[in-house]
Amino acid sequence: MPSQPHYIDIRVNPEIAHQPEELKKAIAKYIDVSDKHLSAYKVVKRSIDARARQIKYQLRVAYFLQDESVIWPKTKEKIYHQVKDENSRILVVGSGPAGLFAALKLLELGLKPIVIERGKNVRARRRDLAKINKEHLVNSESNYCFGEGGAGTYSDGKLYTRSGNKKIIKKVLQTFVEHGASEDILIDAHPHIGTNKLPDIITKMRETILNFGGEIHFETKLTDFIIEESQLIGIEVNHHKIINAEACILATGHSARDIFYLLHKRKIKIEFKTFAMGVRVEHPQSLIDKIQYKTPERGEYLPPSAYSLVEQVDNKGVYSFCMCPGGIIAPCATSPGEVVTNGWSPSKRNNPFANSGIVVTIDDEELTDFEKFGPLKGLKFQEHIEQKCWQLAGESQRVPAQKLQDFMSKRKSTSIPKNSYQPGTTSVEMDSIFPKAMTKRLRKGFKKFTQKMKGFDHPDAVILAPESRTSSPVRIPREEDTLAHPQVLGLYPCGEGAGYAGGIVSAAMDGERCAKAVYHQLFKQ
């Protein structure tokens, strides 16, 4: 009978964790055998414990002893069915994480996905991103949010989620590995792919969908829904072409504002959803390393450090969002006449700066001046702030910026520290951008963060505005059991844009969930 691996949890110094032979000796010593009697081992979970002065790697290790058969448990790969036109045809609108994983799950279930994407493929999309950075030109259909892979392609590739369903999370991560991601994401406590690697992975996912009979249509924009007697039977694209299908998974992301406007115009129910807004803060990565690792130099065996901060201020949350070690702040506007910031990191996280969103909860109290817009009031507030930033920055993609210390002291910055934002910065006081209640909470939050991380208010720390696309300000309701919209049979709101996910993994999970819901509804299983 084949042997099963043994498991231990072990803490080791960083240099040992990165040297296989030294780690083997440490494991053998821990289980009290000669390293010659340890025939094979594999790290299956890995995290860093930086709480004590001596930083350690916390490892879960699987191993076999001498004379035991070394047979590692295999992960079951997904089986996709070859589909044809006569198979049930399901529309998937949007090719972000939710849409791509919905399409892959449909292939598993033997249904034909027809993916509609308003933007371009990843290769063509890069040229439009370069124009934003260099020429300040925003293509409203091809940018950091719209195009193959959605916002996920250029949003760092963090794969951490608070969802407790470890089995499904592992399946999502395994799908990324099957399409080219490093197997490290299966073992790291906070897995990360890197923006530089995501385009190739997304391309391979596209190839899987096409190779098994699915369709993907780029530069194809949903412009209307075709509904008969409360049943969705298809969609209109590019204002003239009709595509018929048996169901539609709507995975258009949190920045597809035209979809929210269309739903509202068609009197298809949408709801206001609490969201968050604030600024991007950037520090030298070496400073964050010094604070977090409590050492002057990080050394070669520790990764660039991250942080996660949260406080309650005036009974509302102030917290870090999408923290990017060794990262870059990017211009993420989706229409001309607005400024938006976001952050990402390459796989090695080797840029000289660390950035993070620092945001506050936005609920009804902040939106009294926007109540007339009903369920679109949060969206209108977002637009108002983004357009104001564009005007204050000289009607360009230059971003309003202020030294953190100056913001804390309520004074305008006479100079802006060197930073990673390529289109450039303009010195602007944040009080001229955000409502007073917001800047008050941000100041209190930064004060508390500095108490937790001494040096956080360093003279080189700079804040850039706005960080406004943390999540959708709109929820598209759906039935709890069927996941279909309560008014429109066959319409399945999905992912971040519909208000049911927050990040790549949770969006992917929701995409799979909606695909399964479509299958169960069609075949009543």
Image (cartoon, rainbow, N blue to C red):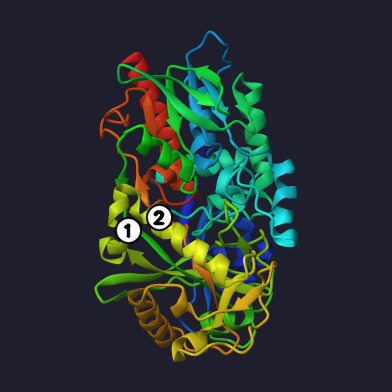
Give left or right: position of 320 versus 139: left
User: What residue is pinned by disc 2?
Assistant: 380
Vertical comparison of 321 with 69: above or below: below
In depth, the one of 56 and 247 nearer the eye is 247
Q: Quadrant of residue 24?
A: bottom right
Which secondary structure, mark 1? helix
Tag 2, which secondary structure? helix
Residue at 48 percent of width and 32 percent of height: 102
Q: Residues at badges 2 and 1 in contact (C-beta under 8 Å)? A: yes
Residue 492 x, y percent position in the rendering: 38, 30
Q: Position of residue 403 (x, y in %)?
A: 55, 84
Q: Residues within 10 Å of mark 2 (few under 14, many from 20)?
A: some
| Residue at the spot 65% in from the left edge and 53% down from the top edge | 138
Classify 139 as above or below 329: above
Query: Badge 1: few (under 14), some or many (20 or more) residues near its Cα, within 10 Å?
Result: some
Q: Position of residue 324 (x, y in %)?
A: 57, 66
| Horizontal relation, residue 482 to residue 150: left or right | left
Residue 357 appears in the picture as rendered: yes
Q: Quadrant of the C terminus?
A: top left
User: The residue under label 2 is which amino acid type?
Assistant: Lys
| Left or right of 379 on screen, residue 269 | left
Q: CA distance from mark 2 to mark 1?
A: 7 Å
Q: Residue at x 65, y 42 (%)?
A: 201
Residue 76: x and y in percent read: 52, 32
User: What residue does disc 1 label?
Assistant: 370
Q: Earlier in the sequence, mark 2 or mark 1?
A: 1
Q: Amino acid at mark 1?
A: Phe
Q: Residue furthest top?
A: 86
